[in-house]
Amino acid sequence: MAILNTQPDNVNFLSPLGFKFLIQKLPSTNFFTTQVNVPSVAVGDLNMPTPFIQVPTPGDQLQYGTLSLTFKVDEDLTNYIELYNWTTGIGFPESFNQYRDALNDNADIKIPTNLQSDGTLIVMNSNMRPNKEFNFKDLFPVQLGDIQFDSQQLDLEYITCTVDFRFRSFDIKSV
């Protein structure tokens, strides 16, 4: 019996520090990104009836989890406003003009005419060089988190905010 070689080619572990995240619509947010997740991917299952038991079989549709991005808020709130304008432009909670303004020029932040944007997560290798790219298609924000002010903190911790995105799909490629 032949001995199988089960030694991997690369024995380096993936570091949680080596990443960059870029969204075309969020130039002010990209720099301040501190956390991002690779969302879950699931395929549903179907139960095939038999006279005895239900036999599980693979489904035919992928379901993607939520892409969550955490960023440090800059003191002018530029990155927060960038996301706020994008989110309210999609939802136009007060008038239809908010949608029109989001397509043109809302406040100080210019938003392109498409209310969705592609995003790229660049994962670095152990030498901090780009290794893999996760390319997310048609991202849009579904929830912009709260900003928590707290005058009772003993140490200075800069304010962070989290935004959740939904998207159509993503692919992974080597760089």
Image (cartoon, rainbow, N blue to C red):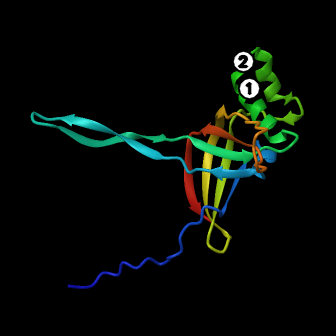
Quick one: 7 or 118, which is closer to the camera?
Answer: 7
State the residue at coordinates (77%, 36%): 149
Q: Secondary structure beneath disc 1?
A: helix
Is the residue marked by circle 1 packed among few (<14), some (14-19), or many (20+) residues within 10 Å? some
Residue at the disc numbered 2: 93
Quarter placement of the N terminus? bottom left
> Does 160 appear above or below 84?
below
Residue kind at label 2, given as amino acid type: Pro
Residue 78 at x, y = what percent? 84, 40
Identify the residue position indicated by label 1 in the image. 88
Hey, which quadrant is residue 99 in on the image?
top right
Q: Nearer the viewer, residue 31 or 133?
A: 31
Tell me the CA gap for discs 1 and 2: 7 Å
Q: Residue furthest bottom?
A: 2
Q: State the SS at label 2.
A: loop
Q: Residue at x 24, y 41 (%)?
A: 56
Question: In the figure, is residue 119 to the left or right of 56?
Answer: right
Crowd band around label 2 with a 10 angstrom C-alpha radius: few (<14), some (14–19), many (20+): few
Residue 29 position, x and y percent, is 77, 46
Under mark 1, the amino acid is Thr
